[in-house]
Image: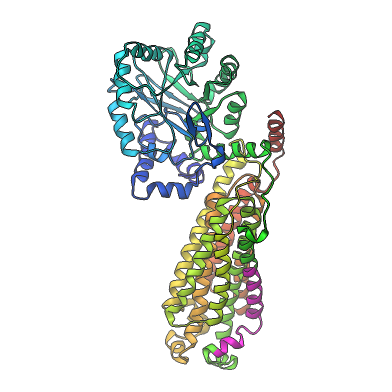
Amino acid sequence: MPDWTYQTVFRPALLRMRAQYARSVALGSMGFLSRLPLGKRVIQWVGHMSPDSRLATERKGFTFPASVGLGCALDPHLSATSAFGEFGFGFLEIGPVVTNPAAKVGAIHLDASNETLRFESPHVAMTPLAANERLQKDGPFRLPIFARIEPSSSDEAAQIVSVLSGSVDGFVVTLDGLEALLEMCDDKLSVQIPALFVAMDAITWRDKRQRERCAQAIADESLCGIVVVESEEENSARQIGKAGFGEALETVRLARIELGPQPIVIGSVGVHSPADALDYIEAGADLVQVDSGLVFAGPGLPKRINETLLYRQLMTGGDSEPPTGRVGSQSWFWAMLMGLSMIIGGIMAMIVATTRVVLPYDELMAGLTLEQLAAVNDRLLSFMRHDRVTLSGTMLAVGIIYVTLAWWGIRRGVRWAFVAVTASALAGFFSFFSFLGFGYFDPFHAFVTVILFQFLLLTIHACMTPRHQMEAPDLWNDRRWKANQWGQLLFVIHGAVLIAAGLVISAVGMTTVFVHEDLEFMHTTAEDLFGAHPQLVPLVAHDRASFGGMLLACGVATLLPALWGFRRGQAWLWWALMLAGSIAYISTMLVHWTVGYHSLKHLLPAYGGLAWLWVAGMSSYWFLVARDRDLEAEWARRLTRK
């Protein structure tokens, strides 16, 4: 569930349920989807969450694909571990794992206003065998897995480690648990211990004796590092969320100063926004963990953090200059040329449609002159004009989106923009064959299609440069961001509806050709039109099927940017979608009014589509377009400090 569905639909529904039930529903559904055939690919495709390879980091023998990981608090039963592995995380923490978990666990209390979750004792935990079985079933994983374990003796430590050591890359323990593990080593038990991390809360860190125990274990190379966790309450209840963020941040800062640069330091309390993750990194943390942030901010949080860290890296690493090379060798050039060709073709088609409607070439193919077409039905040419103007407006819309995605997206190394253009173009080109359903082959149309298809092949074959330029990403879960979730949801629905409409119109073009409102407008019947001339209906079907295919391409070009491309400050994307959609809808409505085709039922999709487009656009305007001076000042402060 991306943020645009989570914040608008699922979060309000889940927060109205009992916390335990809501967790079971959310994690169970995610786990079920990820275990279906192609389920992980669906999660990857919809979420587009894989971190940029430049975010990978190596520490203490580990390769982390990203600096943000998942904490163990949300999914102690590993119900959705396979799904979380595709969320853009750089590592996963599972657990807690104990030898004898409680049969009955404490309640969970959710405080939405303060963004906290409180777990009563006893806590949910897994046995080593159950955890190992789940990991074996869901694996292999492409990222490090750490297990939070709670042994009370060296025997329990040996039992846990012996079962899990082959499935995880390291263990996270408290200082007391560390003593049990070290005692196990002293006993020379034949158990292989992976890397060890110690979980430290702010209260424990303030105890000088405990700090010295931790520092000594690091000096002895018994520990790889520390995980700064939330403080446990006196009654053994645990609270995760924003309440403990300040204390944990200060603990990270002090730990880095005292322990030096060698050990890995992980901040894992209250990461609910990209700004929180940056605060930890700037305080000295190597990695951050997310848990309660997924509940209150949404599943897209790790992706947003990754983009924030990538932007910071680009702005401070000196690699923000565009790559050099011949323009003709770059994908963006050919994608833009394809879009410009469609804009030029759309303008030419619009001119023809608003003047004589058909070209001499059409008359030759159909075997009917302009006068003969007009004689068949006094409204036939008006009907064809309405079809062709609508097609031209959609061509212009597609061309505008392609040019914009090529220049502001693909040229900057934005992978999703490349996928959006190529997927949309492929859908449009394959739809070329749809009008063959009525046996009408247009050689001129085929020739133009072949030329444009070469541009697509060159787009795919040419170089796709690494991402080198970004707008400043958002840092907070503010009103603009929350309003944009609604706008993004509406744009996604809009693109999906256009795809469905394109498929329906293509099917109509290949079968019945005319709908009831068309025949009513021309005051005729389908039988009369089919019997008027053998090539008349195929000519109209050719227009219908072409429009359906172009609408399908437009739907894909709208849906994929809406799924993947909404980032704070991307005004270019907002203007592209709004301009393209408005041109298509307004040209459709104007030609209907001009020719007298006033059927409300027929025009309702155009009226509704334009209204839907502008409601979506206004919901996203303040996030995508409006200048955010507070964000600019915050980024300037952080980059200067860096």
Q: On the rendered structure, is 135 left or right of 505?
A: left
The relative height of residue 1 versus residue 367 in the rendered view (above or below) is above
Could you tell me which residue is drawn at 58 percent across and 14 percent down? 258
Q: On the rendered structure, is 232 left or right of 481?
A: left
The relative height of residue 542 versus residue 105 in the rendered view (above or below) is below
The relative height of residue 498 versus residue 361 in the rendered view (above or below) is above
- Main SS of the magenta segment? helix
Q: On the rendered structure, is 352 left or right of 216?
A: right
Image position, residue 469 (x, y; %): 66, 46
Could you tell me which residue is drawn at 62 percent across and 42 percent down? 480
Q: Nearer the viewer, residue 452 or 551?
A: 452
Q: How is the image coloured?
A: rainbow
Image quarter of the N terminus: top left
In this rendering, does residue 350 appear at all?
yes
Looking at the image, which residue sits at the far top?
209
The relative height of residue 119 versus residue 437 in the rendered view (above or below) is above
Image quarter of the C terminus: top right
Image position, residue 553 (x, y; %): 53, 64
Could you tell me which residue is drawn at 36 percent across and 40 percent down? 31
Image position, residue 472 (x, y; %): 66, 41
Q: Nearer the viewer, residue 410 or 262?
A: 262
Question: Which picture quadrant has residue 403?
Answer: bottom right
The magenta segment is 341-364
